Amino acid sequence: MTHSNNLFLIQKQENVLVSHPFESEWQFIVQEQGELDVFFLGLNQNLKLSVLLNGEKAKSNIKCAYLSNKSNKLNIDIKVIHKHKNTFSNQQIKGLSADESIISITAGIEIPKNTNGCEGYQNHRGILLSDKAKISAIPQLEIWSEDVVCSHGSAVGPLPEEQLFYLESRGLKKSEAEKLLLSSFFNDIVPDDFNTYIEEWMEQNV
């Protein structure tokens, strides 16, 4: 992997882990048969991420966890461009919004004409930890080829009452039940080394 001014060139399989990024803008170009696995953890931080799949069989797997509190207003902008056929991308985004924070998320996939055989997936889940917290998620799919497979999904809301009730009926206090559910919420995208940051944030905000 080579890079200059947060522009990264991916020529083979690379695993990139970023926590508390000083820079908010990141660009990746994935060459033929290259594979990018990238994870971002943002604490009250904006993120602008673009990925260009620049050769056949290029792949990108993007995982992003965000945490926001107080009256912060955050923007998360992710876009993947499938420039060549037979490319693959997956975006998994999860986060928590507490207090009066407002989060705007735009997640895009672009597949130009004559780039058949591409696959692009998006999935976002957001949890509101107060009545005044807000999360707005806007998927943007620009699909100009017919022989492709794409899907997207987004769900935003408070912690499920039925799950809280179940845990409370087993003897947990409500605060303990909330922390247990929130900890498991991130299990499928957050590397083990990053769990401490999330636990510390939840101790102060949940």
Image (cartoon, helix red, strand yellow):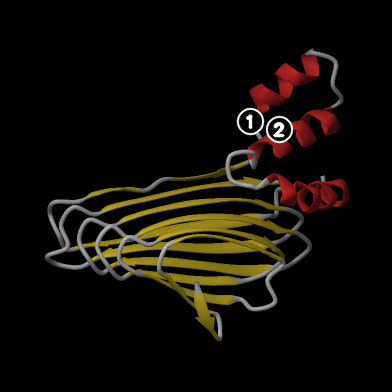
Q: Residues within 10 Å of mark 2 (few under 14, many from 20)?
A: some
Residue 156 locus on image (x, y percent): 55, 45
Task: Please give the count of numbered marks on the rendered protein.
Answer: 2
Q: What is the three-letter code of the residue carrying label 2?
A: Leu
Q: Is residue 118 left or right of residue 97?
A: left
Label 1, on which residue?
160
Who is closer to the viewer here, 158 or 203? 203
Q: Are marks 2 and 1 in contact (CB under 8 Å)?
A: yes
Looking at the rendered image, the quarter that the C terminus falls into is top right
Instruction: State whether residue 182 appears in this view.
Output: yes
Label 2, on which residue?
181
Q: Is residue 97 left or right of residue 93?
A: right
Q: Which mark is residue 138?
A: none
Question: Mark 1: which secondary structure?
Answer: loop
Residue 196 locus on image (x, y percent): 80, 49
Q: What is the three-letter code of the residue carrying label 1?
A: Pro
Asked which quadrant contains residue 163, the reply is: top right
Residue 25 locus on image (x, y percent): 55, 77
